[in-house]
Image (cartoon, grey):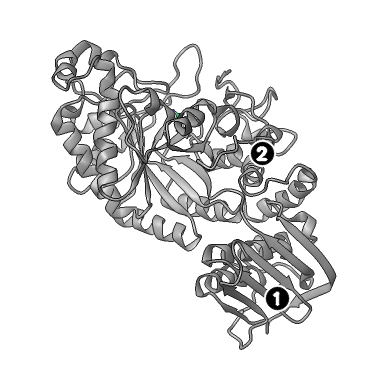
Amino acid sequence: MSFDALLPKPLHVEPGDGVHVLGPGTTVGGEPGVVAWFRRNIGAATGFAFGPGVPAAIEFRVGGVPEGYRIDIGRERVSVLAHDAAAAHHAAQTLRQLLGPDAHRTAPIHSAAWTLPCGVVTDRPRFGWRGCHLDVARHFLPKREVFRFVELMAAHKLNVLHLHLTDDQGWRIEVPRYPKLTEIGAWRWRSMVGRGEVDAFDDRPHGGYYTTDDLREIVAHAAAHHITVVPEVDVPGHSQAAIAAYPELGPGPRLEVWDRWGVNETVLNAQPATVDFYRDVLDHVMDVFPSPVICVGGDEVPTAQWERDSADRAAELGLAHPAHLHGWFLRQVIEHVHANGRQALGWDEILDAGGPLPAGTIVASWRGEEGALRAIEAGHQAVLCPEQHLYFDHRQSDHPDEPIPVGFLRTLDDVHGYEPPAADEVLGVQAQVWTEHLDTPRRVDYAVFPRLAAFAEVAWTEDRHTGFRDRLEHHLARLAALGVEYRPLDGPLPWQTRPRVAGRPR
Ligand code: ACM
């Protein structure tokens, strides 16, 4: 496979002459994590054992380059110098791409020789935060699908999985101290279907949750792929599943886990016991997730409930208006996260929530870029997640058969063309996968791919603007070999459509 087929496009390539041929006797050595990955993945695809050798034919060494990796492919030896284990993993992913699409399969079917083109690749990422958010609250994804998602992210050299674990429609993390969060909060009787003028429901229970051990396993699987899992517990809005489990967290009446889509008027109350409850939840979350960053949500918080019932509480707290309970609530949980040596992340509404945002809070700018610019102005760091470019639940075309078309029209080229503002405080970029309308892993594949490939180039490579379509053609063959049901470039296949289910295009 030619170097021109690599995606994301590497920083620099010097093609050489000839090829390096892999065979049953090829040895692999060096950084143990990447050697294990290589044996498991390239070993499965080729049927070769890739045993140890001194020196090994393919050697991954860590140290010796300031950042990123350098791969030197010669006829006799393949030598990788990587800054760290993550960069060594990126190099291994590059080698897999160079071996061709069949190297992405799980069993050998390839009868021709396995070859790598001779030459030198020098590569490093553009951004440190190359994220993808995944909403497992609106529709649950079984953990095997999360493992697969992690592997697909790693194949695109992404490194942050922002896991949206709680929302109005479902609570997905077991919290041993509060068992009703999952006994009651992890499922709903029915779900809204589409976003039509007239409400439609499916009359089918939906649910699921991850046990503590499942979550530790997800974290470990991600870590083996050099991906950090940033957990999100969304407060003080998007909390009806928790309120259904523990009504004392909410406005009073017993509520069910929400079965609708949209912004919910029901929010957490501002009682001290509610904040204590969430401190406990966050303690468990911080125990399970070693991520230096913990997301506390903060988005889409209607304040009518507090204006109705919490004026006294706001006054007691010295707030000028009950709406400022939004900022007050967030400060309580953010300070708790920070007191535990982590950094809080919140959606950009946290800038408008009333009152100061604690130093060190990171802002996820989703309603465009303005949130990032304002956050930076106020001394914060930002991750660029603009819905105008990077929301993958939004429709990919104006094709009449596009399934449940919601949000902005965001084509593959729109994603690929995204340029975040240049500033040191921009940690990076993040794609969002909200799942109100993605009710199966197959629908997630359709929404995410191949736009995630375009996004991977935004995150990895500044100089990406020529040759993308050619790289993508090669990449689609890799996705097919990986079993990804991506959206074909010319529109959905018949079984990828949802006839008569209304969307809500913007
Ligand atoms: C969001 O889309 N509510 C962050």
Apparent side of residue 282 relative to residue 463 in the rendered image (left or right): left
Q: Give the distance between the C-alpha atoms of the residues marked 2 and 1, in whole angstroms.
A: 35 Å
The residue drawn where x is 50% and y is 30% is 366
Helix, strand, or loop for circle 2? Answer: loop
306 or 488: which is nearer to us? Answer: 306
* Residue 289 x, y percent position in the rendering: 34, 53
Q: Residues within 10 Å of mark 2 (few under 14, many from 20)?
A: many
Image quadrant assignment for residue 57: bottom right
Residue under circle 2? Answer: 487
Q: Residue at x 59, y 36 (%)?
A: 447
Looking at the rendered image, the disc whose residue lies closer to the viewer, 2 or 1, is 1
Task: Specify the quadrant that holds the C terminus.
Answer: top right
Question: Does residue 400 sit above or below 161 in this rendering?
Answer: above
Q: Where is residue 475 in the image (x, y as percent from the top left)?
A: 71, 51
Quarter of the image that includes the N terminus: bottom right
Q: Where is residue 306 in the image (x, y as percent from the top left)?
A: 23, 16
Q: Is residue 181 above or below residue 169?
A: below
Amino acid type at image mark 2: Arg
Percent coordinates x, y for residue 280 in the rendering: 20, 44
Ligand 1 shown in quarter: top left
Q: Is 175 situated left or right of 144 in this image?
A: left
Q: Which residue does the image show at 19% across and 29% down from the upper left?
A: 249
The residue carrying mark 1 is: 78
Helix, strand or loop under label 1:
strand
Left or right, 159 with reference to 328: right
